[in-house]
Image: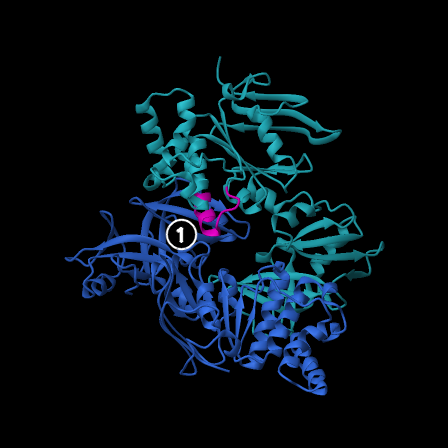
Amino acid sequence: MVSIKLVNISKTFGSVEALKNVNLEIRDGELFAILGPSGCGKTTLLRIIAGLEKPTKGRVYFDDIDVTNIPAEIRDVSMVFQFYALYPTTVFNNIALPLKSKGYSKADIEKRVKEIAELVGIDKALKLHVDKLNVADKQKVALARAMAKEPRVYLFDEPLTILDPVTRVIMRSELKKLQQKLKQTIIYVTHDQIEALTLADRIAVMNFGVVEQVGTSWDVYNLPDTTFVGWFLGEPGMNFIEVTVDEDDLSIKIGSKKIFSDPSLGKKLLDLGLDKALLGFRAENVALVREVSATYNSNNIAIDGVIKVIEFFGTHYVVNVETEGSEFKVKLSVSEFNKLMLSENDRVKALIKVDKVCFFNLNNNRRVL
Amino acid sequence: MSKSEYIIQVKNIVKTYNGRKVLNDISFALKRGELLAILGPPGSGKTTLLKIIAGLIKQDVGDIIIDGRIVNDLPPYERGVSLVFETLALYPNMSVYENIASPLIAEKKDKEYIDKRVGEIAKLLKIEHILDRKADKLSGGERQRVAIARALAKEAEIYLLDEPLSNLDAKIRYALRTEFKKLKSILGKTIILATSDPIDALALGDNVILLFNGAIIQEGRPSDVYYAPRNISIARYLTGNVLNEVSISIDSYGKSVSVDAGQEFSIDPYFLKVLREVSETSITLASYADACIIDKSIESCSGIKIAGEFIGYEYRGSEYLIYARKNGRIFRSLRTNLPNVTFGEKVDVCIPHTNALLFSSKTGDLIR
């Protein structure tokens, strides 16, 4: 049980800046995911928390105690990796080993191993040699062994990547149940956004050694702080279109073309001192209509465009619409798509829910609305 | 002579290696500007087929007809096709520009033409900014795009692309798919693309050919193949082996019905009538995740309802994928919200008959 604070952490390897002034607060008992593409610095950050790596600059605090110079062995952390490294012996012995080194009595070890094995659901296999286990059960043993160390914090580095998709889903549920029971702090590093969105209480999204945003799954998906977060999350990622605001009539334009929008929106942007911005919205928050003169209201932004590419994904369609040299994607269910009978080069009107729209500052790519 | 309706026709191609037929009587035809996706698992014969079309391998039997002319005896460079392999054999010491230009230099095009052509292609593939960079300094995604640019640099009538999107980061892959499709309509070129990824084939192809063990087992528009897979193995393949399936047995009198997903099930009376009219006694009912409903309790289900256990979910931002299990069967359902249940709790799984696929359990063939 511990809360963790990272203050102004930087790390350079030779001339490479792996981490640039990272600040994070991980709350006691939360499952905190660090998400980002490969090379974003997430594993380096985890190793710094573990004490396996020293930051070039900055401090690491466990419960307000500075542990920056405390070696890994006495930080009381347990790591679980993508590739479990189990001892070639029984499940029981694997879990018992950390307890033995802690000086538990034989009877206490028996009791504790059973408790932990039950918690992770491996109690039926205690007498088996680990070679006899399937991949998921091996990973459960790795988890049980991590628990036997009775750490203050668990550090997970892509532990489920090697599992097949269904087992991965089941293991995620198990992990979530376990965490709700144990209320332990877990830091979970992954490049898999579904994993992070599904598991985490909060997520830090990283890119090029920088933390772009910290927030709940809902926050990072729906209200990305930066264009990177909007682009990185979701399949497809968020749509971005450059717009200008007309200072006279408060209308919003793409290129030279006015789009339909409530004047209050244009005013908000001007009030922020922006006559240019990046309009961001998600492909599933757009409806397409055929009628050129469709009626719309202040709940929607309306953009006229031409269909360039239609892609079928089985469970849905993605329609690429072009307007004034900009392009955006619209995700439609199969029934919606079939109703509209769309084909390439058709003219359409895209209605975007105004409460699902974001605006970003063009200069720094940060969200302003 | 008027041009053929088809830019390319492949007729009865057979290829045998060491007594094993790797391609067995392959025939298809493509219209100008069409994108055909050849979809099949690794080892199904996709690459061999592309090499035969390109003229790098000679078929044992059959004809390749390009623009109305049999090209069986023509060398690769006279066929008007350009082939891109999965293995990106870029020249590491040459710049991106030189890599893209190399097929044009080989064709002895003049410098002005090469400059213009490389510029166009680089713009299309958004690699203008790295034209001066050495190929060995590129990221995986950049390499792929450079390789594609090089393949498209040569002005050919037909482009053959072998797994062009494999080994790419998911984001780049998603973007490149759309680029490809756009490119096709901009250039008006004919493309044959081999892939083992069903999503690539469905999203990109005007038409799809399913190649299993060297034979075409189905062809058609992506949505036709998806909604009427000829055999359950195709449906499984298209979903990456996560098709929702239930086996239903009906005794020969049509009276008793049993389901392999446990005793707790109910079948809508109308649907039961449909099942009884089918002459098979063992039917596999299958559905895709968007056509399956999983919830705490489902009052009315116009198909088959099964009692399952909620085992987990995936949150994808735009939607949830709900997982339930019964008797080792896994069911998946796409929803916009989470059902109000905890892990391990009982849930109802409903497969409505309107969107369900019926297969013979014996042969696996589509009944309806």
Q: Which residues are magenta?
A: B165-178
Q: Nearer the viewer, residue A80 or A55?
A: A55
Q: Position of residue B357 (x, y in %)?
A: 66, 51
Magenta run includes residue B150: no
Q: Position of residue B342 (x, y in %)?
A: 60, 75
Classify residue A79 by image quadrant.
bottom right
Viewed as shown, does residue A12 lie left or right of B21? left
Q: Secondary structure at mark 1?
A: strand
Viewed as shown, does residue B205 lie left or right of B175? right
Q: Residue at x 51, y 82 (%)?
A: A1
Chain under disc 1: A
Residue that numbered label 1 is attached to: A288
Q: Position of residue A283 (x, y in %)?
A: 41, 55
Viewed as shown, does residue A65 lie left or right of B26? left
Q: What chain is the cyan one? A: B
Q: Residue at x 57, y 45 (%)?
A: B197
Q: Main secondary structure of the magenta part?
A: helix
In the displayed image of the protein, which residue is found farthest to the right?
B252
Q: Is residue B216 above or below residue B317?
A: above
Classify residue B145 by image quadrant.
top left
Judge whether residue B302 can be spotted in this image. no
How many labels sit on residues?
Answer: 1
Q: Is residue B71 above or below residue A269?
A: above
Q: Nearer the viewer, residue B169 or B175?
A: B169
Q: Nearer the viewer, residue A66 or B60?
A: A66
Q: Nearer the viewer, residue B318 or B302?
A: B318
Q: Is residue A87 above or below residue A261?
A: below
Q: What chain is the blue one? A: A
Q: Residue at x 53, y 76 (%)?
A: A73
